Image (tube, rainbow, N blue to C red):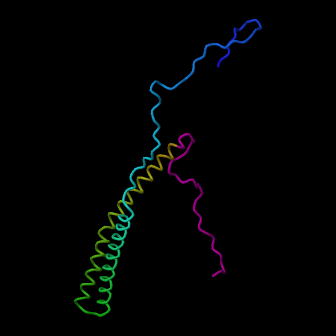
Amino acid sequence: MRWTRPLFASAGPKTPGNFVQDGPPPGGFPAVKIQRSLPAGGLSSVALMSGLVLTFTYGMYQIIAANRQRRQARRAFEAGSALQLLRALAFNREELDIRMAVLPFLTAESDVKAAFIKSKMLENEAELMKDVPNWEAGASVYKTRYMSPMEVFGVR
């Protein structure tokens, strides 16, 4: 309730003024949803475990197959059997050829990436140090000439 009184009124009894009370809208407020609405949990634990077991089994199969092939090549090399030795050498040579064929592409990719990063670093350095007089981006910050370490005689 709000009590009102004229600003310059004489002393007298206080009388309540008009008031407005807040209430619900016509028809009431909408119901509050309190039910849990969680999304579905995805795959079941059985499906996840089955997938893990299958993946592990396939990986172990691949490892065992590669070990068998490597073991056969080693035995052929140790036994000295001409045909098996040729097969083992061909297998090893094929693996080496594959690695040698891919290496230049990997090196070129690494070089391009390193050159790009270096150019970005130089751009950033030039931007940061633009207000410093006589600053060269990419130049060495050490202005002394190289001196090799002093030799110590009598110590070996």
Residue 59 left/right relative to 13: left
| Residue at the limit of the structure toward the front, as seen here | 27
Out of 39 and 75, give the one closest to the viewer. Answer: 39
Q: Quadrant of the N terminus?
A: top right
The answer to which of 62 and 114 lies nearer the viewer is 62
How many marks can you see? Answer: 0
Q: Does residue 128 appear left or right of residue 10 in this picture?
A: left
> Residue 131 location, x and y as percent?
56, 39
Write down the quadrant of residue 30 in the picture. top left
Q: Is residue 145 above or below residue 39?
A: below
Most foreground residue, 98 or 71: 71
Split into 4 quadrants, where in the image is the C terminus? bottom right
Range of magenta residues: 128-156
Magenta stretch encompasses residue 125: no
- Residue pictured at 46% horizontal, 24% vertical: 26
- Image vertical order of residue 47 relative to residue 126, above or below: below
User: Which residue lies at the image location 29% right of the left edge and 82% below the top edge?
Assistant: 69
Q: Quadrant location of residue 59?
A: bottom left
Instruction: Say which residue appears at 34% left-offset and 66% top-offset.
Output: 51
Image height of 141 relative to 3, above or below: below
Q: Nearer the viewer, residue 5 or 102?
A: 5
Is residue 147 on the magenta stretch?
A: yes
Residue 10 in picture, x, y percent from top left: 76, 6
Give the percent coordinates (x, y) of residue 34: 47, 42
Q: Main secondary structure of the magenta part?
A: loop
